[in-house]
Image (cartoon, rainbow, N blue to C red):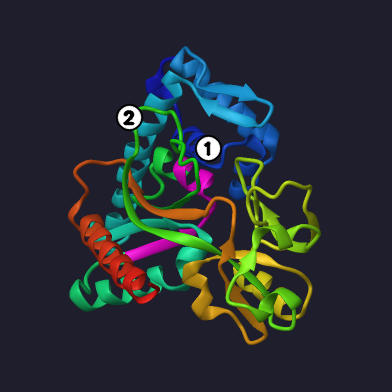
Amino acid sequence: MSFSDASLTALRVFREVAERGTLTAAATALGYTQSAVSRQIATLERAAGAPLLERRHDGVRLTAAGRVVVHRAATVIDQIDATARELAGLPDERGTVRLGWFTSAGTGLLPRALAELRRTHPAITVISREGSTPALVRSLRAGTVDLALLASAPPYRPLDDESPPLRLRTLAERSLLLALPAAHPLAAGDAVDVDDLRGQSWIASANSGDDRLLGVWPGLDERPRIAHTARDWLAKLHLVAAGCGLTTVPASLAAVAPDGVRVLPVRGGPQERRRLLLAWLRHPLPEPAARLADALRGQSWIIQAETR
């Protein structure tokens, strides 16, 4: 069996696995059983004559051959889909940009940039989806998004070690702040001392891809007491308003905090700053993606100036 015999279904399955990072997640997204996904991958590996995935305890990782296949698969699938649209009489989607974004980018930057793009380039269509930074990095590699808004925390390690390296631009650096109930004793001042955070109850969620807890002040010298877990930032803030605990927020979310929440800086210890990154793989960027990148950069500068 040669690689020219590989089916389009197998290529779609392989791209989904590369993007999701696990066979189980890919099977769920596609509506397949895990065994069906495994069979498609095995067929593709036989056709390639080489392993395409390295199986690890935390999922799968692309081999060198796998990176070649996923890059070519993305091109083939996009061309097939474009042909299908043309045959169906649908408009060409060359003016479409696929954007991935991490959660807090959706509270200010993304809506404002999209509104500006509609004003200046109304013919460009943006299709976006939310995801964690590790998942969006995989999406860039798999070719299912063109641009991604990502978050990076100290010590600002590389987002992955694949080749070629992702192209990155820092849009902003923002301080991490503390959200606490307005009636909380620590809410009376203009800042909170880091030492006073010991023994507090936290509203947090696990961050995909590492051991960091999102919502707990970094670097505390104790095991944090997690009272509630929530992935959605607005849900966390409403739990804070109800007096259920404390959580951390980027500075961009301070403006959307509900009544009953105070957002304050923390004194002492290293000052935590988060980088907002724009990432892409293709170079040069196609014209529609470049126009969206310009809109995101422009709005990030405006928002950063407003929050100073």
Where is the C terminus found, in terms of image quarters? bottom left
Position of 148 with respect to 221 (left or right) is left
Q: Report helix, strand or loop for mark 2.
A: loop
Numbered disc total: 2
Q: CA distance from mark 2 to mark 1?
A: 23 Å
Q: Is residue 68 above or below residue 289?
A: above
Magenta stretch holds residue 137: yes
Classify residue 291 as left or right of residue 250: left
Start-end of magenta stretch: 126-138
Residue 21 x, y percent position in the rendering: 57, 37
Examine the rendering and report whether any part of residue 254 can be seen.
yes
Residue type at mark 1 is Val
Residue 279, position in %: x, y? 35, 47
Q: Nearer the viewer, residue 306 or 114?
A: 306
* Neighbours of disc 2 within 10 Å: few (<14), some (14-19), many (20+): few
Check disc 2 and report the residue beneath it.
164
- Residue 153 in magenta stretch: no
Please tell me which residue lies in front, 176 or 31: 176
Q: Nearer the viewer, mark 2 or mark 1?
A: 2
Can residue 31 be seen here? Answer: no
- On the picture, is 151 further left or further right than 216? left
| Location of residue 131 with respect to 17 vertically, above or below | below
Write the residue at 62% across / 23% down. Answer: 55
Residue 276 pos. (x, y %): 41, 55
Determine the image quadrant of residue 167. Answer: top left
Q: Residue at x 63, y 29 (%)?
A: 38
> What residue is pinned by disc 1?
13
**Sequence-wise, which precedes: disc 2 or disc 1?**
1
Q: Amino acid at mark 2?
A: Pro
x, y percentage for residue 216?
Answer: 67, 57
* Label 1: element kind: helix
